[in-house]
């Protein structure tokens, strides 16, 4: 029996030495910056910044093996100050008792807040830990400047087709009775899209179809089937993914909380990406509830953030709360309709100039050209409303895109707009009498 069958393919393929790592040769090749640091043993603390599946965790593990250091791994999604303190205590013990370095690897470091990131600073400065943070987000925006200044940032790149092909060839060396034709290879590479983890997971699923004798041909038809099954793997009842999404969306729109939760949990139970569902819930709050209940959008967004922080199973309850709130909220698609109407209007009509009275006049030349002339500052007017002022281009006149409903907060909004229109009408009538 082949040795790889006793462990996941990704773990079996994980490199043990720097030279075995596929990709990232701009920092790991002979004479390159990170390779020199590893070979010399003079490692800086660092940030590894790059897209998913390009080897951030692998590089950190290989570095620890190469410098004979204790390796501690934390996930910023699942860890907090308690785990940070425990890791520091382990580093102190190994340093004092074994005179050994500790590499503290933090995956998705951008998810730690400022105080959590600050907790690493004294231990980096003292040399107790060599800090390696991994992030898919721009560290300039997502990592504290204090932590960033103490780390060397290395930018990792998506793997090229040639580099991904190297991985495919390594797999086929282990499964010598399995073949892959050229079209299938191309489909696999397109699906992987520079992500080694995505590639390896797909290869493992393909290989598993040939158990127990592990022999056969990987064809384009098989690749297409596996990719389709992978995309819709949660769909245990036979329906298409977007049919279930549609059912959840329409159940919320139809104010049926029970069906809304049913479709949500059915997809989660089958393995659908909860963050995709969370994004869809946010979309529903904007499209179908809108300004009838603006709080719905906040609750939907918070549910997304809670799931990001807590994951399973606690995060699921936040999604359930959000979907129930949306189902029970007053409904309005007025803002969504206004959005579509304005976009359509802009695409079909001439782009007129901004009226002079609405333009800023930061220079004397602009002022001499009547920029800002006769502009009425709303806060200086009764009710903070400059009745009769026109805000559209002169060639257009007033156009009503947003039409509030008689539901929820939009009842008040509609009353407010009607009141403001009465002020405009009164202003115009008074001007006509002069």
Image (cartoon, grey):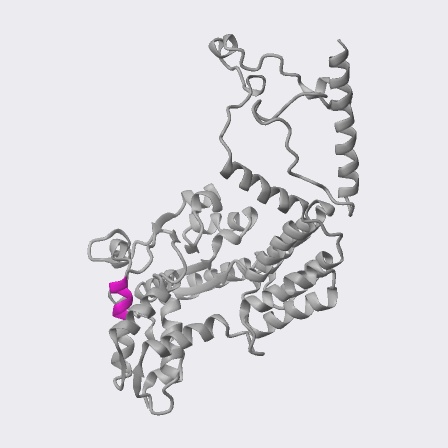
Identify the image quadrant of the C terminus.
Answer: top right
User: Could you say where residue 293 lies in the image, as x and y percent from the top left?
Assistant: 73, 47
Residue range in magenta is 161-167
Extreme-left residue of the structure: 30
Report the predominant secondary structure element of the magenta stretch: helix
User: Could you say where residue 334 lies in the image, as x and y percent from the top left?
Assistant: 68, 45
In this picture, residue 230 sits left or right of residue 339: left
Q: Residue at x 47, y 56 (%)?
A: 108
Q: Is 1 drawn above or below residue 429 in the view shown?
A: below
Residue 260 is drawn in which quadrant?
bottom right
Of residue 252 and residue 41, the one placed in the foreground of this image is 252
Q: Is 349 drawn above or below residue 433 in the view shown?
A: below
Of residue 208 and residue 422, the one placed in the foreground of this image is 422
Q: Is 104 drawn above or below residue 228 in the view shown?
A: above
Indicate yes or no whether the magenta region holds residue 199: no
Of residue 201 and residue 389, the one placed in the foreground of this image is 389
Residue 221 visible here: yes
User: Could you say where residue 414 lies in the image, as x and y percent from the top left?
Assistant: 76, 38
Q: Residue at x 51, y 49 (%)?
A: 117
Q: Is 74 drawn above or below residue 382 in the view shown?
A: below
User: Could you say where residue 48 lies in the image, as x and y percent from the top left?
Assistant: 38, 54
Identify the image quadrant of the N terminus.
Answer: bottom left
Residue 64 visible here: no
Residue 426 is drawn in which quadrant?
top right
Of residue 75 and residue 263, the one placed in the foreground of this image is 263
């Amino acid at each position: 029996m082949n040795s790889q069958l006793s462990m996941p393919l990704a773990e079996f393929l994980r490199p043990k030495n720097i030279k075995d790592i596929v990709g990232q040769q701009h920092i790991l090749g002979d004479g390159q910056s990170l390779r020199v640091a590893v070979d010399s043993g003079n490692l800086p603390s660092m940030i590894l910044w790059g897209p998913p599946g390009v080897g951030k965790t692998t590089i950190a593990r290989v570095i620890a093996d190469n410098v004979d250091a204790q390796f501690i791994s934390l996930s910023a999604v699942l860890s907090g100050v308690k785990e940070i303190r425990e890791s520091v205590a382990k580093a102190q013990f190994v340093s004092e008792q074994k005179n050994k370095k500790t590499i503290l690897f933090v995956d998705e470091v951008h998810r730690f807040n400022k105080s959590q990131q600050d907790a690493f600073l004294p231990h980096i400065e003292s040399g107790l830990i060599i800090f390696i943070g991994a992030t898919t987000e721009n560290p300039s925006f997502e990592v504290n400047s204090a932590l960033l200044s103490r780390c060397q940032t290395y930018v990792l790149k998506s793997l090229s087709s040639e580099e991904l092909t190297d991985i495919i060839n390594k797999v086929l060396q282990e499964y010598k009775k399995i073949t892959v034709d050229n079209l299938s290879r191309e489909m696999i590479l397109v699906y992987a899209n520079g992500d080694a983890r995505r590639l390896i997971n797909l290869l493992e699923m393909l290989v598993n179809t040939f158990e127990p004798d592990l022999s056969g041909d990987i064809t384009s038809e098989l690749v297409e089937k596996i990719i389709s099954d992978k995309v819709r793997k949660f769909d245990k009842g036979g329906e298409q993914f977007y049919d279930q999404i549609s059912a959840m969306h329409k159940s919320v729109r139809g104010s049926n909380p029970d069906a809304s939760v049913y479709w949500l949990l059915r997809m989660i139970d089958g393995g659908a990406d909860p963050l995709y569902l969370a994004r869809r819930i946010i979309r529903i709050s904007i499209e179908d509830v809108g300004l009838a209940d603006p709080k719905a959008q906040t609750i939907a967004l918070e549910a997304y953030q809670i799931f990001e922080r807590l994951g399973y199973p606690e995060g699921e309850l936040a999604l359930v709360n959000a979907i129930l709130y949306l189902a029970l909220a007053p409904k309005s698609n007025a803002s969504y309709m206004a959005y579509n109407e304005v976009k359509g209007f802009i695409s079909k009509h001439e782009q007129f100039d901004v009226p002079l009275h609405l333009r800023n006049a930061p220079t004397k030349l602009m002022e001499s050209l009547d920029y800002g002339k006769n502009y009425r500052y709303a806060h200086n007017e009764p009710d903070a409303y400059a009745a009769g002022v026109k805000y559209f281009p002169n060639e257009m006149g007033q156009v009503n895109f947003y039409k509030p409903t008689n539901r929820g907060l939009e009842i008040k909004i509609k009353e407010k707009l009607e009141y403001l229109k009465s002020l405009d009408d009164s202003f115009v009538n008074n001007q006509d009498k002069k």
